[in-house]
Amino acid sequence: MPNQTTSVPRAAGVVVAATGLAHLVVPRAFHAITASAFPKDTTTWTKRNGVTEAVVGTAIAIPATRKAGLVALAPTLRSSVRG
């Protein structure tokens, strides 16, 4: 049974990755959020953001790449908040 130190970051990574995949499956659901930061070619940027979130979330979910994923998460969050 995994301990909380392992399972919480893994769950957080899965949530981030799933959100990223949702950007690819239903990009229009994210247009309102993405359009404020990227008014031109919003669909392309929505998909780029989705790929980024999927990769970062996967990295966080895997213990061997977790530190790199957390480092990559900081600018991703900063760009999301700035929008």
Image (cartoon, rainbow, N blue to C red):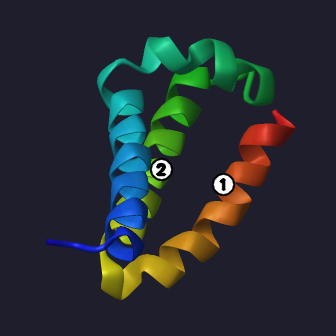
Point out residue 26 in the picture as x, y percentages from the top left corner.
35, 18
At x 72%, y 61%, the residue is 75
| Quarter of the rendering occupied by the C terminus | top right
For label 1, the residue is 76
Is residue 67 or residue 42 the one in the foreground? 67
For label 2, the residue is 53
Point out residue 36 in the picture as x, y percentages from the top left corner.
78, 21
Amino acid on which disc 2 is placed: Glu
* Residue 27 sits above or below residue 2 on the image: above
Q: Secondary structure at mark 1?
A: helix
For the view shown, which residue lies furthest in the left direction? 1
Is residue 5 or residue 10 the one in the foreground? 5
Amino acid on which disc 1 is placed: Thr
Point out residue 31 in the picture as x, y percentages from the top left corner.
58, 16
Residue 31 lies left or right of residue 57; in this view the side is right
Label 1 neighbour load within 10 Å: few <14, some 14-19, many 20+: some
| Quarter of the rendering occupied by the N terminus | bottom left
> What's the distance in space between the residues labelled 1 and 2, CA to CA?
8 Å
Earlier residue among tags 1 and 2: 2
Is residue 50 or residue 42 the one in the foreground? 50
The quadrant in which residue 19 appears is: top left
Q: How many marks?
A: 2
Question: Can you see residue 9?
Answer: yes
The quadrant in which residue 32 appears is: top right
Verify CB contact (< 8 Å) between mark 1 and mark 2. Answer: yes
Q: Secondary structure at mark 2?
A: helix
